[in-house]
Structure formats: C-alpha cells, structure tokens
Image (spheres, rainbow, N blue to C red):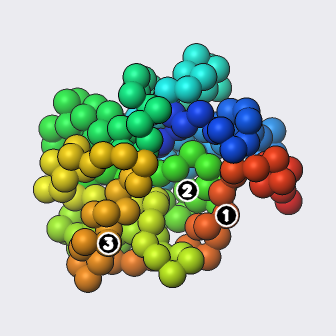
Amino acid sequence: MRVACVVLAAGASRRLGRAKQLARVRGEPLVRRAARAALEAGCAPVFVVTGARAAAVEAALAGIPVACVRNAAHAEGLASSIRAGVAAVADTTPLCDGVLVALVDQPAAGAALLRALRARFEAALGARIVACAYAGALGAPAVFPRALFRELAALRGDRGAKAILEARGEEVIAVPFADGARDVDTEEDAAQLDD
C-alpha cells in the first residue's frame, strides 16, 4: 500500500522562543530527523509543511527527497497545516491509500515507530486509522485512510486531528508509544534532546 507522510513543521515555537524545527538531536535538526524517519519508513511522497521561519526550515532539508508545502495560514494552528499537507497529498498522489501525519517535535518518533504504524495500517487493508497511544490518549504520529481526507481537510483551529481520533476512538488501532508525550516546547526540553 502507498502511504504518504505529512510532517507538520510550520509552528512559530512561541513557548521555546526560537524555531524548534531547527533544534538539534545529535547534530541533526528536528525537521530533517522527522523527514528522514518518514523516508526510511517507506513513506512516499513525504511533504513537510512549513510556515514560520519557512526559509530556514526548508534550508535544513536540503539534499533529501521531500517536498515543502508553505502554509500561509500557519498562525491558525495545527489544523491549517494538516489541511495544507493533505491537500498536497490529494493533488499529487491520486493512488495514495493513506497519509501518516507526524509532528516535528517528537524526537522519539523514529523510522521504526513509523514502520510499525504503516505495517498495522497495511494489515488493516488501509481501512482503519492507526494512531499512537500515550499519556492516556491517542495522538500523532497517526495514519489516516484516504476515505478520511475530507474530514482532515475540514479541521479548524489548533487541535489537529485529535477530534477525529476522539470521535472514532473505538475504530482506531492503537500502537503504544511510551515517549509520545516527550516533545520540545521549552529550552529545558531542547537541552535534553541529546540525552
């Protein structure tokens, strides 16, 4: 099955005060690490949605085969980036069976996890959502079937796809991801990236 990936990397990083997309793990910017994980997991194509500090974030992706999608409405929140990414997938990849939505600031979401999500999606024949389970909830990274692209395109605000995951919770295949809640929002978080 063909699974595209949308890496959400458009945020302004207000709490951190600098571009979290460019924070480094073992010398590699988070945005490049997230895009590389998607490629290594076999996702194709991989779109990185940029917005705040777009030029610098896109420069960090030089030399790897991903497409950048600029989200002019990024200040609206996560939903606008999901809409932009899903629109790019729908426009360019008509035979795509699903889309994996990943966040740029989950350093523990590597290729092995994304491969596991894809495998569960394929085992379900692309008919069910496969999402990570952590902190008592379902969340990203998550794979959504093509049949839900319209629902993803209708999202609004700063909640991302949580509303869809909550509404369809009984139908979602959950994949445990113990480090899913570990993200990068503060300087303390960023300082721990190389741990």
Ranked by sequence position, the earlier of labels 1 and 2 is 2
What secondary structure is found at the residue carrying circle 1?
A: loop
Q: Nearer the viewer, residue 112 or 191?
A: 191
Ranked by sequence position, the earlier of labels 3 and 1 is 3
Residue placed farthest to the top in the image?
A: 55
Q: In this rendering, which labeled residue sits more in front, label 2 or label 3?
A: 3
Say what amino acid the circle numbered 2 marks. Ala
In the rendered image, the quadrant that contains the C terminus is: bottom right
| Image height of 101 relative to 86, above or below | below
What secondary structure is found at the residue carrying circle 3?
A: helix
Residue at 64% over, 38% down: 13
Mark 1 is surrounded, within 10 Å at the Cα level, by few (under 14), some (14 to 19) or many (20 or more) other residues, namely some
Residue at 36% over, 46% down: 157
Total tally of numbered discs in the picture: 3
- The residue under label 1 is 182
Residue 147 image point, x, y percent: 13, 56
In the rendered image, the quadrant that contains the N terminus is: bottom left
- The residue under label 3 is 166
Gap in angstroms between the C-alphas marked 2 and 3? 25 Å
